[in-house]
Image (spheres, rainbow, N blue to C red):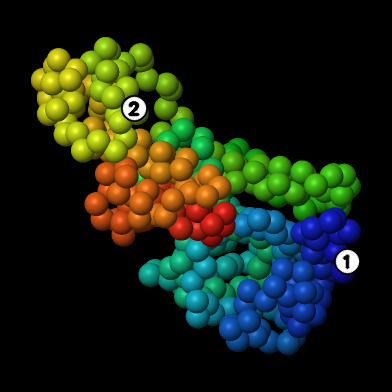
């Protein structure tokens, strides 16, 4: 076993260590994320490569022996498993079984335990929900106002999943250590590549939105309403008032927003307000979360915080403090 000599120490390599040895090195490098879980049997052997950087982990691992890991506290991340041998069993609201050629996407916030069976081996990724949501919002060019949900079970024969596996092979290969050591930007670039890979290849409820071509140029009445909402994000303007400003009927304006903005007038107005809130709270010396919410037309600060968290994967208070969840 050895760890790479990168500045950030993000790679752990194991040539068949006991679970105690692996756990000790893992905790020294990444912190003891599993401190509250019962330890596996001492005769379990763990081998492979594990890396972690800024909310994203990647791995190419094998486990000799059967054992379980319980999760007393939920993790706010999604784990993507591409099994290559044996089985892995996740217990949450239902049971999910991963075997060769069957991949799993598991929301760890709903996970109770996992079990490794029949000398399981896998390629895998785990990504914080905050990192996935923030990147998705960037790719879409708008806040994400619904919870991101991935297809829980997929067939791994598709070239898209073979691409994810190839990227993990690259990230865990010994040759890649040289690139990780070459500069401080490489770990972040690798992280971004892994996040983009799952958002692009693994089906989820925003897949069609990511692949949808740009809509046609909006007609003048829709453009007038959009320009007004952008210029007056805090105004308590109704759809009927926007229709009068745009010189069309409310129904015509509603149809225009659905066709050219892909959402209702209310949803678009909320998106504009959230974008302005994000811009304000990201600045140094930003006003309080309550002040920003009220200024932008959110009368319920708790509801504003919920919308903001869903849209950007980080709470408004954490963003204001310069933190990431």
Give the position of the C terminus as an image quadrant.
bottom right
Left or right of residue 146: residue 181: right
Instruction: Give how far across and how far down residue 80 sits, in percent.
Output: 56, 56
Task: Determine the secondary structure under disc 2.
Answer: helix
| Residue 128, placed above or below residue 18 | above
Which residue is the site of mark 1?
A: 2
- Taking the image as shown, residue 7 lies to the left or right of residue 90, namely right
* Image coordinates for residue 300, horizontal then vertical, percent: 26, 55
Estimate the x, y position of residue 75 in percent, counting from the top left: 52, 68
**Image position of 190 with respect to 113: above or below:** above
Residue 284 lies, with reference to residue 1, above or below; the image says above
Identify the mark at residue 274; answer none if there is no mark.
none
Figure quadrant of residue 24: bottom right
Is 310 positioned to the left or the right of 325 in the image?
left
Per the image, the residue denoted by label 2 is 231
Q: Is residue 242 left or right of residue 113?
A: left
Q: Which residue is drawn at 71% across and 42% down?
A: 189
């Amino acid at each position: 076993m050895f760890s790479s000599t990168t500045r950030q120490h993000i790679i752990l390599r194991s040539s068949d260590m006991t679970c105690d040895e692996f756990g000790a090195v893992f905790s020294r490098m990444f912190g003891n994320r599993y401190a509250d879980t019962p330890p596996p049997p001492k005769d379990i052997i763990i081998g492979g490569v594990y890396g972690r950087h800024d909310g994203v982990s990647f791995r190419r691992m094998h486990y000799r022996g059967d054992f379980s890991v319980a999760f007393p506290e939920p993790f706010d991340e999604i784990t993507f498993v591409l099994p290559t041998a044996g089985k892995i069993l996740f217990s949450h609201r239902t049971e999910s079984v991963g075997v060769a050629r069957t991949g799993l996407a598991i929301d760890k916030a709903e996970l109770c335990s996992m079990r490794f069976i029949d000398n399981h081996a896998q390629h895998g990724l785990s990504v914080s929900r905050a990192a996935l949501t923030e990147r998705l919002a960037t790719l879409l060019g708008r806040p994400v106002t619904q919870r991101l949900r991935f297809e829980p079970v997929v067939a791994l024969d598709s070239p898209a999943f073979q691409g994810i596996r190839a990227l993990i092979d690259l990230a865990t290969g010994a040759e890649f250590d040289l690139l990780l050591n070459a500069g401080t930007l490489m770990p972040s670039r690798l992280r971004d590549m892994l996040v983009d890979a799952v958002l692009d290849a693994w089906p989820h409820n925003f897949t069609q939105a990511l692949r949808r071509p740009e809509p046609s140029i909006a007609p003048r009445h829709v453009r007038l309403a959009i320009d007004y909402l952008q210029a007056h994000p805090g105004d308590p303007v109704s759809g009927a008032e926007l229709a009068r400003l745009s010189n069309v009927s409310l129904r015509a304006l509603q149809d225009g927003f659905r066709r050219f903005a892909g959402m209702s007038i209310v949803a678009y107005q909320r998106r504009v307000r959230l974008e302005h809130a994000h811009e304000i709270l990201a600045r140094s010396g930003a006003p309080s979360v309550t002040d920003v919410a009220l200024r932008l037309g959110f009368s319920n600060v708790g509801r504003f915080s919920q919308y903001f968290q869903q849209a950007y994967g980080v709470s408004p208070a954490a963003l204001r403090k310069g933190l990431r969840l």
